[in-house]
Structure formats: structure tokens, C-alpha cells
Image: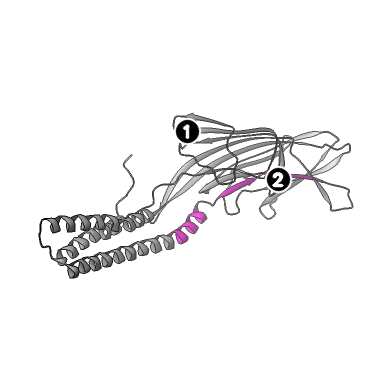
Amino acid sequence: MTKRITAIVFIYACTVVAWFILSGIIITRTEAQDFKLKNAIGELWGTRQAQKAPYVYYKDNKRSDKTTSLALESSDIKVNLNLEHRKKGLLWYPTYKVTFRGKYVIKNTTNKTKEIGLDYEFPAQGAVYDNFKFTVGGEEIENIALDSGKISKLFPLSANETKIVEVSYESQGLDEWSYTFGTNVNQVKNFSLVLHTDFKEIDFPEESISPTEKILHGDEWELSWKYSNLLTGFNIGMIMPKKLNPGPWVSKVTVAAPVSLFLFFFVLFVFTTVKKIKVHPMNYFFTGAAFFSFHLLLAYLVDHISVLPIQ
């Protein structure tokens, strides 16, 4: 009996080791593909986009380079996110198209005429921007000069005068979209951001602000962030929903497989002992091999057959 139990335990342990080796191979192959293919997707489609609020400032005097920042008087932003999953190799990547429209009101809060400076930074360096428009005071800036991924514009403002700056474009990104107010705690006045999605499963990044209002239209969301006078160091963001990737899924299934084999061996051993049926350890070996062959076949077929549910 002792030799029989030892043989069964040895067979079970060898099968478990084989499962862990198979799982490790799947993980290694998936991670290697992900590192290579994600870079390829980023080059072909785009990367994560983080749209920063425009930075507005004025020089303290003409002879000095010292500047003083100005808070935006108001921000009215409209964003549309359209999800388009793309498959590369064995992995699905949550790519999206974004339409951005921002309307900002700038006010000279001093009692003197100032030359106001505005720095607008693009959300990603390696992205494509179509239908880009940049207007200051109703005048569209035609010849846009880029400097390290940003646009700088100088314009005069009289005391207590206001001007409207509008920015709009269409672009595309990967994984996540966000709107940032700055690196530190910032004052946000008369802020409104309305985000439309064409997908139902929404999630927000860590250390981000939740919407003040959420409206579901079928399978689409209309999310709003509206504040009159806000002090915050957090951002607004949206994480794109992901599809089930076959590599990680098969790895998890394979790692959990020893549990089912243990229960089967245990029940089989108890019943055969009670019924006094002699089952040779080789039968346990072939049973373990059958269990393992299923996951080996699964790891191979997942390269060719989709594991996603039929929709």
C-alpha cells in the first residue's frame, strides 16, 4: 500500500511539474510577443494620450524672463472616444479614436496691458492629428510652429480683457486617454468636460476624478465633469475595455489544472480502496497524461481558434 501511494504521489508531482513548465512557456511567449507587438501597434496606430491643459502666463516685465502663470477663466471640453480593438499576433490591443474640442477663456486679471503667452502641449509625441484647428480670439492660426511637441503663442491683452482660445483635432491612441491639469495641485475654474464613449464597460485610472454625472444611452456613456472652483492634483481619465487575451487565459487554466487532477486521484483512490479494486499506478500515470494532454492541445489550438464568446 505504501509503495502504491508513493508511486501515485510521484506521478501526480511529475504531472504538476509538467503543467507549471507549460504555463511558464505560455507566459514567456506571451510577454515576449506583447513587448514586441505593443511597440509595433504604437508605431502604426498610436500610444497612450494624456492631453494637458494649456499653460497661460505673462512676463513680469520686458527685461526679465521671469513669468507669472494665469489660471484659465473657464474650460469647455468635448471628447468622443470610439473603441476599435486590434489583433496583433495572439494578443488584442484596445486602440481608440479620439475627437477633442477644447474652448478656453483667458482673462488678463492685472490692471495693465500684458503680452500673454500660451503653451499648448500635444497629448502624445508619436501620434497623428487630423483636422487640427487652433484659434485665438476667433482668428485661426495657419502657420503652426512646433517646439518639442508643443505650440507657443503670444498675444496682447488689455487690463481685464478676455480672449477665447479653441483647440480641436482628431487622433488615435492605445490603452488609455486622460486629461491633466498639471503636475501639482492646480486651481480649476468654471470647468466642464463631457466625454462620450461608444462602449459600455468603463473604468477609470487610479488617482483620477470620478464623473459628477453619468448617463447611459444604450451601450454608450455620456460622462460629465463640471466644477465651478476646484483645487486638485488628480486627473481625468478613461481606461479602454480589453478583450480576453488567449495567452494569459490559457496560462491561468493550466496553473489551476492540478486541483482537478488531485480531486480525481483522491476520489479514485478512496473508491478503489473501499471496493478493494487494485488499480495499478500506471493507470494513474495514463490518467494524468490524459489530463495534461488536454491543456497541451489547448495551448496549441489557442493559436488558431478564438477563445472569445460568440457575439
Of discs 2 and 1, which sits in the foreground?
2
Q: Which residues are magenta?
A: 34-60
Q: Position of residue 133 (x, y in %)?
A: 65, 40
Name the side, left or right, on which 239 lies relative to 269: right
Q: Position of residue 270 (x, y in %)?
A: 18, 56
| SS under mark 2 | loop
Q: Secondary structure at mark 1?
A: strand
Q: Nearer the viewer, residue 124 or 293?
A: 293
The residue sitting at 40% across, 60% down in the picture is 30
Does 136 sit above or below residue 43?
above
Q: Amino acid at mark 1?
A: Glu
Q: Residue furthest bottom?
A: 3
* Dot 2 alpha-carbon crowd within 10 angstroms: few under 14, some 14 to 19, many 20 or more: few
Q: Position of residue 90 (x, y in %)?
A: 37, 55
Looking at numbered disc 2 in the image, what kind of residue is underneath it? Val
Q: In the rendered image, which quarter is residue 194 located in? A: top right
The quadrant holding residue 213 is top right
Q: Are marks 2 and 1 in contact (CB under 8 Å)?
A: no
Left or right side of 210 for 140: right
Badge 1: residue crowd in 10 Å (few <14, some 14–19, many ≥20): some
Is 145 a magenta residue? no
Q: Which residue is mark 1?
A: 220
Tell me how far mark 2 sits from mark 1, CA to CA: 32 Å
Which residue is depicted at the point 23% across and 67% down? 11
* Quadrant the N terminus occupies: bottom left
Residue identified by numbered label 2: 185
Question: Is residue 279 or residue 171 the one in the foreground?
Answer: 279
Residue occupying image coordinates x 85% and y 41%: 114
**Along the viewing direction, whichever of 284 and 6 lies nearer the viewer:** 6
Please give the count of numbered marks on the rendered protein.
2
Q: Residue 130 at what x, y percent from top left?
A: 58, 44
